[in-house]
Amino acid sequence: MGNIVLLENKLTAEQFCNLEEAVGFGRQNIRQSEKAIKNSIYSISVNIEEEVIGMGRLVGDGARIFYIQDVCVKPEFQRKGIGKLIIEKLLDYIKNNSIPNSRVTVGLMAAKGKEGFYQKLGFRIRPNEKEGNGMMINIQI
């Protein structure tokens, strides 16, 4: 594996779509992806020799609620610490850019079978003794 270069807030819509397709999420609408990136609080892309091999984004209100979104690593680079690096950089951003002496909530939805990866990084599964299930709805426009 070559030298890893991390780029902050430089992710393009084409790179975004290519990574999501590479991990099996399908090819997304390019205009929708452009808007999603523009409206992100922060994004990180992982590059090796000019190739974008991983990404992650933060969305939310930037104060109390942060949501980790679109963490993707090309399959041939998985299980090499890239995903962990992405999560650590996203969490570092939150810690370094949040109001001192405050508490924030960081949420995410893990892809099926990836829950253990996030648990190792300190995330907890819901439901649990104190928290109910997370919920979502998909709306076709």
Image: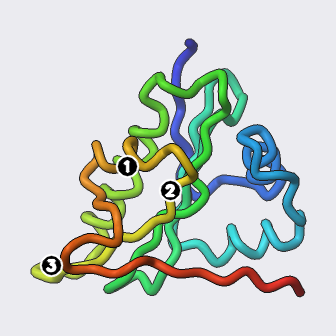
Disc 1 marks a residue whose amino acid type is Tyr
Secondary structure beneath label 2: loop
Q: Nearer the viewer, residue 114 or 56?
A: 114
Marked residue nearer the N-terminal end (2 or 1): 2
Q: Nearer the viewer, residue 59 or 9?
A: 59
Marked residue nearer the N-terminal end (3 or 2): 3
Disc 3 marks a residue whose amino acid type is Pro
Mark 3 vs 2: CB contact within 8 A: no
**Category of crowding for the residue at label 1, using alpha-carbon neighbours closer than 10 angstroms: few (below 14), some (14–19), many (at least 20):** some
Q: How many marks?
A: 3
Mark 2 vs 1: CB contact within 8 A: yes
Disc 1 target residue: 118
Q: Residue at left 85%, top 60%?
A: 28
Quarter the N terminus occupies = top right
Residue 86 numbered mark, or none: none
Q: Is residue 90 above or below residue 47?
A: below
**Category of crowding for the residue at label 2, using alpha-carbon neighbours closer than 10 angstroms: few (below 14), some (14–19), many (at least 20):** some
Q: Residue at left 81%, top 45%?
A: 21
Q: Provide residue 23's location: percent of width, then percent of height.
A: 71, 41
Q: Nearer the viewer, residue 81 or 124?
A: 124
Q: Provide residue 105's location: percent of width, then percent of height.
A: 30, 77
Q: Gap between marks 2 and 1, in whole Å? A: 8 Å
Q: Is residue 3 above or below residue 58?
A: above
Disc 3 target residue: 100
Q: Gap between marks 3 and 2, in whole Å? A: 28 Å
Secondary structure beneath label 1: helix
Secondary structure beneath label 3: loop
Marked residue nearer the N-terminal end (3 or 1): 3
Disc 2 target residue: 110
Disc 2 marks a residue whose amino acid type is Ala
Q: Provide residue 79's location: percent of width, then percent of height.
A: 48, 25
- Nearer the observer, disc 3 or disc 2? 2
